[in-house]
Image: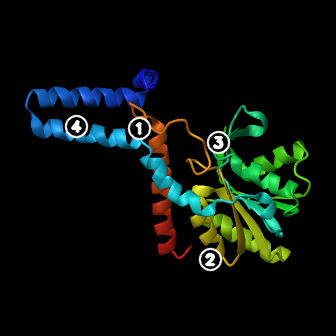
Amino acid sequence: MLSQLLHSLMFLSEPLGFAWGLLVLSASRTLWRRQFRLGAGLAAIALLMYVVGATSLPGTILATLERPHVRVSLEQVPPADAIIALGGSVQPSRYEAFHLDFTAAADRPIMALELMRLGKATVLVLGGSGGEIDHQPLVEADLMKQWLAAWGLPQGEVISLGRCENTHDEALKTRQLAGQRGWKKIILVTSAYHMRRATATFQAAGLQVESVACDYQTSVSLESSSSWSLVPRYQGFHKLALYLREVIGWRIYRWRSWA
């Protein structure tokens, strides 16, 4: 317990921990001077930062989006006509190999490739947005396709959807492709926290979907030695941001009849 407390104190050197520490000191000093209204306000902000950044609450909330999409075995995934891996797993980079900088969502293409290896489909469809390097437009799916071709992966066809603005755009382009190819069913691969909105969006586009989630962010899949810290850290804020983005995105997509 003592070693954990001492280790937590090291997090005061991080920007978030340092700001929280100053806030606690300011609140304490203000209350000592009997400026109760201001001190209570500062203390409330410090408490909110602590709850989000130092407890398991954000992970517990985000887990409500992940848990419904748990799949014990990939072997049980039924075959389909194609696998679609949604974008967000890479971003264009000037100096990286293949101009690819992998993000935290890199589990998406890895999961899609594994499903291909298992023979669940012979066609891999890549979604994603893009960016610009030195005034040259670079598309995420095109860069991924070039990398896979250079490495001889996978054993099947790889199709780029081109630049997509959002999940709805990916669904519409996949529907068009499915109509041209005569596909009846696709396997949809994306992050577990994003799966509800993604599945509903593809279904609203008229596609029959088998969902395979990955990129878990919480204890639903990940082992954690401790969910408590003396000093707030950024991970809790990241999880809360993912949850809020999905909740807001879900309402927007429902309002626009995209899901």
- Label 2 secondary element: helix
Q: Are marks 3 and 4 in contact (CB under 8 Å)?
A: no
Mark 2 nearby-residue class (10 Å; few <14, some 14–19, many ≥20):
some
Q: Which residue is mark 3?
A: 103
Q: Which residue is mark 2?
A: 204
- On the image, the x and y values in percent for residue 25 come to 24, 26
- Residue type for callout 3: Thr
| Figure coloring | rainbow
Q: Is 18 located above or below residue 76 in the figure? A: above
- Label 1 secondary element: helix
Q: Which residue is mark 1?
A: 54
Which residue: 29% across, 40% down? 47
Which residue: 77% across, 55% down? 112
Q: Nearer the viewer, mark 4 or mark 1?
A: 1
Name the N-terminal-most of marks 4 and 2: 4
Q: Nearer the viewer, mark 1 or mark 3?
A: 1
Mark 4 nearby-residue class (10 Å; few <14, some 14–19, many ≥20):
many
Which residue is at the far front?
1
Between the residue at mark 3 and the residue at mark 4, the CA separation in whole angstroms equals 35 Å
Name the N-terminal-most of marks 2 and 3: 3
Q: Which residue is mark 4?
A: 42
Residue 161 shows in this picture: no
- On the image, the x and y values in percent for residue 17 come to 39, 29
Q: Nearer the viewer, mark 2 or mark 1?
A: 1
Left or right: 8 as drawn, with respect to 110: left
- On the image, the x and y values in percent for residue 149 come to 88, 47
- For the N terminus, the image quarter is top left
Residue 230 shows in this picture: yes
Q: Is 7 located above or below residue 87 in the figure? A: above
Q: Is 239 located above or below residue 116 in the figure? A: above
